[in-house]
Amino acid sequence: MAIRLLGSYADILSNPGTVAFSVAGWFGRVSRSTAGIATVLLVAGATQSYALAGLVSGAIIVGIAVGGPLWSRAVDARGQLAVLPIGLVASTLSAVALGTVVIVDAPEWSWFVAAFLVGLTSIDMGSLARARWSGILTKPSQRHTALALESVNDELVFVIGPPVVTVLATTLGPVYGFATGIAVGILGGVALLLLRSTAPRPAAVIPDAGAERTSAARRRARLPGVVIGILPMYFGVGLVFGSVDLSAVSVSAFAGQPASAGLILAVLALGSVVAGIAFGPLSASWPAGRRVLVTGIAYALVIPWIVLIRDLGTLTAAVLLAGLVTTPVLISGISLIEVRVDRRRLTEALSWPSVGLAVGVTVGSAVAGALIDTGTAFSGLTVTAVGAIVTGVAGAVVGLTGGREPTPAGEASERTGGSRARS
């Protein structure tokens, strides 16, 4: 079984340039994965106020939600090679601005403006890597495996990035942690920019055939239906992530073992990574709609029982199970988008799930925190259960409808090998 799984990944990674852009895309993600915690440490170190630090960090999330899809739409229209240089320069300048206004103790409103700009100028490197895979691989099963690999990369960057930045911030100083996360992300983006041969063609050079041009332009003016359907799934997963993060801290403190919070989050990440590695190749032959349906229902059945937990050990075991059903949901949603969406809007479409996830994390953390403050250390787990149910319901709806919508003639059939009809 292990040989089969590894063979599936070795097969897609044997294509020229794929290892290079996948690795570059991983490092490019680091700045997004570390921006929140690095900003919290930077602001808290300067003001001793975690409340203010959390608010400033939240401004980054708002910026990402606003700017992420706009950057991705520009990438689709003009190409990665044209847009990335602008984004990297803008991202560097905004990060320098945020670090500067905090260090020199500028007015607090400027901290929020700079933090918002950090998020606004952040390009989703994961969607750029996924778009490259979609342009290179021809078989639907291979593309699904590649998307699974990138979802594992998403998990790994959050497993490795924040702890490393935290160690640097607490040993050398908050500025070092903040600067390191930003610098690594920028270098990853530069590396991706230099890998020109695997960059997908921009929509501007992909011709619309005759009478299809007007209808294609009209489709590109609205958010694809399948993306609208998938967003609640990712929002629900975000609720789970945000509430589990705070609940791990509160329950560990309640049990008199505050260091256990890190262990709980590591167990969640471990389960997610293991499930992601296995799920990609094993489900490659499933229709895309069925993957969303099955994983969404599994998520809603496995996680909500967490509200019954009242001890640290059982919570750790439950979080491991939650990790095992999480990455399959994320992979299935991305895979369905890749199958359904017009290739001219693929990068933009692939960036929206991360927006839904980020908003869910923000809401989940806020609501769970309020429940914990007014209830018990375990009260935040109610948000975890609700998030799982939201994901399950949305997954069932999207899985049963298949996210069907018009696509340019010939485009979907060429890219999916006929899988659209089977889904």
Image (cartoon, helix red, strand yellow):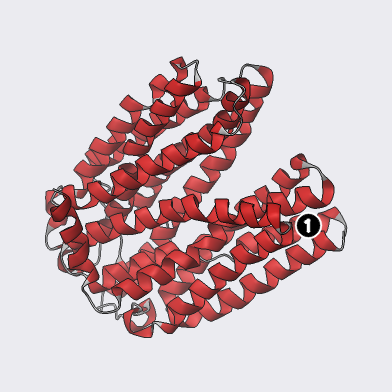
Helix, strand or loop status at disc 1: helix
Q: Quadrant of residue 99?
A: bottom right
Q: Position of residue 121 (x, y in %)?
A: 60, 67
Residue indicated by mark 1: 111
Q: Label 1 is placed on what type of residue?
A: Trp
Q: Is residue 368 above or below residue 340?
A: above
Q: Quadrant of residue 173?
A: bottom right
Tell whether 246 sits left or right of 129: right
Tell whether 93 sits left or right of 132: right
Q: Position of residue 338 (x, y in %)?
A: 29, 59
Q: In which quarter of the image is residue 316?
A: top left
Q: Residue at x 26, y 75 (%)?
A: 211
Query: Total of numbered circles in the picture?
Result: 1
Q: In this view, does 344 lie above or below 106?
A: below
Q: Residue at x 69, y 68 (%)?
A: 94
Q: Is residue 25 above or below residue 283?
A: below
- In depth, the one of 366 and 67 nearer the eye is 366
Q: Where is residue 297 in the image (x, y as percent from the top left)?
A: 28, 31
Q: Residue at x 62, y 21 (%)?
A: 254
Q: Where is residue 61 in the image (x, y as percent from the top left)?
A: 60, 52
- In depth, the one of 379 and 37 nearer the eye is 37
Q: Is residue 186 above or below residue 327?
A: below
Pointer 1: residues within 10 angstroms few (<14), some, or many (20+)? many
Tell whether 338 sits left or right of 59: left
Q: Residue at x 34, y 83 (%)?
A: 205
Q: Can residue 229 be seen in this view?
A: no
- In depth, the one of 326 and 309 nearer the eye is 309
Q: Is residue 403 visible?
A: yes
